[in-house]
Image (spheres, rainbow, N blue to C red):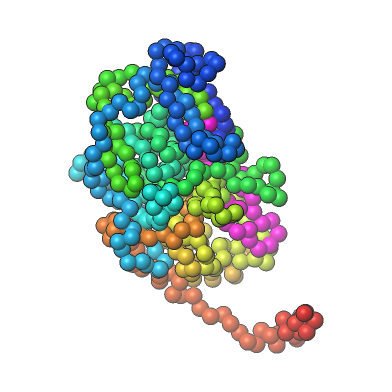
Amino acid sequence: MAEEEFQYLSGFGNEFASEDPRCPGCLPKTQNNPQKCPYGLYAEQLSGTAFTAPRVTNKRSWLYRIRPSALHTPFKPIDMGNMRDDWNSWYPDPNQLRWHPFTIPDAAKGAVDFAEGLNTLCGAGDPKTRNGLSIHIYACNSSMLHKCMYSSDGDFLIVPQKGTLRILTEFGKMTIKPNEICVIQQGMRFSVQVSEPSRGYILETYNKHFTLPDLGPIGANGLANPRDFLTPVAWFEDKEIQCTIINKFQGKMFEAQQGHSPFDVVGWHGNYTPYKYDLDKFMVINAVAFDHADPSIFTVLTCQSETAGVAIADFVIFPPRWSVQEHTFRPPYYHRNCMSEFMGLIKGKYEAKEEGFRSGGGTLHSMMTPHGPDSECFEKASNANLKAERIADGTMAFMFESSFSLALTEWGNKTCLRVDEEYYKCWQGLKSHFNPNDRLKLSETGGESVSKVKKFSF
Ligand code: FE2
């Protein structure tokens, strides 16, 4: 099937039903697990939440497949190179960190597929207790052949930066271009095909599934709209081939073999599915008079902790938009945050640092690590003649923001060889503009000083 013929179901977290058109009526009509399924299929449930989770959060799908997924040889540990949760074995680093674009392996030196090209950059927590997250970088030059993978630990939110991903899943096929994202949830088997050297970012969350953020006073519409999330339609192949199944389990990698394609689901129904989203569909909301909305106004998806309003991780984007605030320093404000902020750049130039932060690279500003615009950006923006203007056209930066204190792996710290040792220098040119005589000027012009106002405050 050509990519343009791929079909999708629209909606976020909907209860869908999908049959491969080659087998109409493959879904049982009146029950989930009949004594005999249509077409001689096996019924298999994939549970994404505890059986007893509240109805509003309960996630499960029923898969009708040629063989049950239990049919494979025992899993054995494998060395997947840089896909490892060794962040506790390195001394913490509170500095502002920046990485040059991560290296894509040279195809002339050997084929590296998506699974082999996974590298864990940083993380926190523990999949054994289902609490925490990890951030991975993928960099590959070839397709996964007769191979699929899944994570027992959490959900993969995949952000391609270079190269279109053609992803086969048990639920159907998806194409994900840069500026689109997809979420492959815990346990779902998938295989990635690429047609060029490819690179991107993955946020893996262990606790819960991603949801859309509440909109509060924004109202019923805005940010990412549910109908723009797309789930693939059922598609299967009936192939007897030797196939490798890779499993990420408790932070370690394993593999098993089976003699048939894992993509043998003829039909499925349920609300636990993979999905994709085009970032250009995001309905941007922002300040239209003065000052800033916090960057949370750009949240696409959130994985919430048990504490109200506190995210295990948010996926936030900085899309093209109008900037119109009056008498305001418009770039992101200087700040220190009780959250960890990992940023990546899909394309273009990020407004707060036009040089140095490059597409395919990243930054990590850890808890309470100060950051903000570089000195050049400050001088430019604080002296600019403000008018309504477009910003970030041709650019898409994003942030994984977490309430966990993220720690680097050996790969992120050392092996990737992409740490930018010069990053701190971008703030070294920040000058003092303090002028105590400004107060005199204020009184001369009839303005009220803060000290005068204080006399009347309580
Ligand atoms: Fe920040």
In screen coordinates, is 412 left or right of 336?
A: left
User: Which segment did they paint magenta?
Assistant: 271-298
In screen coordinates, is 385 left or right of 112?
A: right
Please name the residue shown 43% across and 48% down the image: 130
Q: Up-down: is 211 above or below 429?
A: above
Residue found at the very far left of the displayed protein:
109
Please name the residue shown 25% across and 33% down the image: 74
Please name the residue shown 44% across and 42% down the image: 155
Q: Quadrant of residue 91?
A: bottom left
Magenta residues, dominant SS class: loop
- From the viewer's side, name the closer residue of 12 and 73: 73
Q: Give how far across and how far down residue 252 sits, in percent.
A: 30, 46
Reply yes or no: does residue 290 show up in magenta.
yes
- From the viewer's side, name the closer residue of 127 and 13: 127
Please name the residue shown 52% across and 68% down the image: 336
In screen coordinates, is 441 left or right of 297?
A: right
Q: Up-down: is 199 above or below 36?
A: below
Q: Give how far across and how far down residue 367 sits, in percent.
A: 47, 65
Q: Give how far across and how far down residue 37 sits, in percent.
A: 44, 14
Reply yes or no: does residue 407 show up in magenta.
no
